[in-house]
Image (cartoon, rainbow, N blue to C red):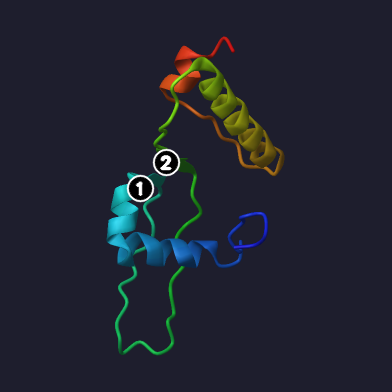
Amino acid sequence: VDKEGIINPKAFYNYLSAWATNDALAYGASQGNLKPQPQRWIHSPEDVHLEIKKSSPLIYTQLPFYLSGLSDTDSIKNLIMSVRDLCLKYEAKGLPNFPSGIPFLFWEQY
């Protein structure tokens, strides 16, 4: 991961294969909805080359985020503005995205 939080693009789909198959608790806990499904890769202690096949490029990804400590309209508005700024940053880099959920629906007028 670089200083901007970007995973090495050349290795991303290899990492995705390993994460989705070998770190089942983290992948399962993420409740991620990834299309197409990541490539299966099972680590074997005898595999000294660690050749991890790349997953296919993602065409759809849905990942939930859990929010806490939002007790008033100002804190929710700050969250919404921060998330929208982050979305715009990555949209400008060619990654279309759209936040959804109660804060974005209920407080949309802000």
Image side of residue 5 versus residue 26, left or right: right
Split into 4 quadrants, where in the image is the N terminus?
A: bottom right
Q: In this view, does 97 lie above or below 77?
A: below
Q: In this view, does 7 lie above or below 68?
A: below
Q: How crowded is mark 1: few (under 14 residues within 10 Å), some or many (20 or more)?
A: few
Q: Name the residue under label 1.
A: 30
Q: What element carries label 2?
A: loop
Split into 4 quadrants, where in the image is the C terminus?
A: top right
Task: State the residue in front, 59 or 25.
Answer: 25
Q: In this view, does 60 lie above or below 80?
A: below
| Residue 57 location (% of width, % of height) | 51, 54
| Residue 90 location (% of width, % of height) | 65, 41
Q: Distance between the residues labelled 1 and 2?
A: 7 Å
Q: Residues within 10 Å of mark 2 (few under 14, many from 20)?
A: few
Question: In which quarter of the view is residue 70 placed?
Answer: top left
Image side of residue 107 versus residue 27, left or right: right
Mark 2 residue type: Leu
> How many numbered circles are shown?
2
Image side of residue 75 versus residue 95, left or right: left
Task: State the residue in front, 60 or 102.
Answer: 102
Mark 1 residue type: Ser
Q: Do the residues labelled 1 and 2 touch (CB within 8 Å)?
A: yes
Residue depicted at x 66% and y 37%: 91
| Residue 75 location (% of width, % of height) | 53, 24
Residue depicted at x 49% and y 44%: 59
Q: Mark 2 points at which residue?
A: 63
Q: In this view, does 37 lie above or below 88?
A: below
| Residue 2 location (% of width, % of height) | 65, 62
Question: In which quarter of the view is residue 24 placed?
Answer: bottom left
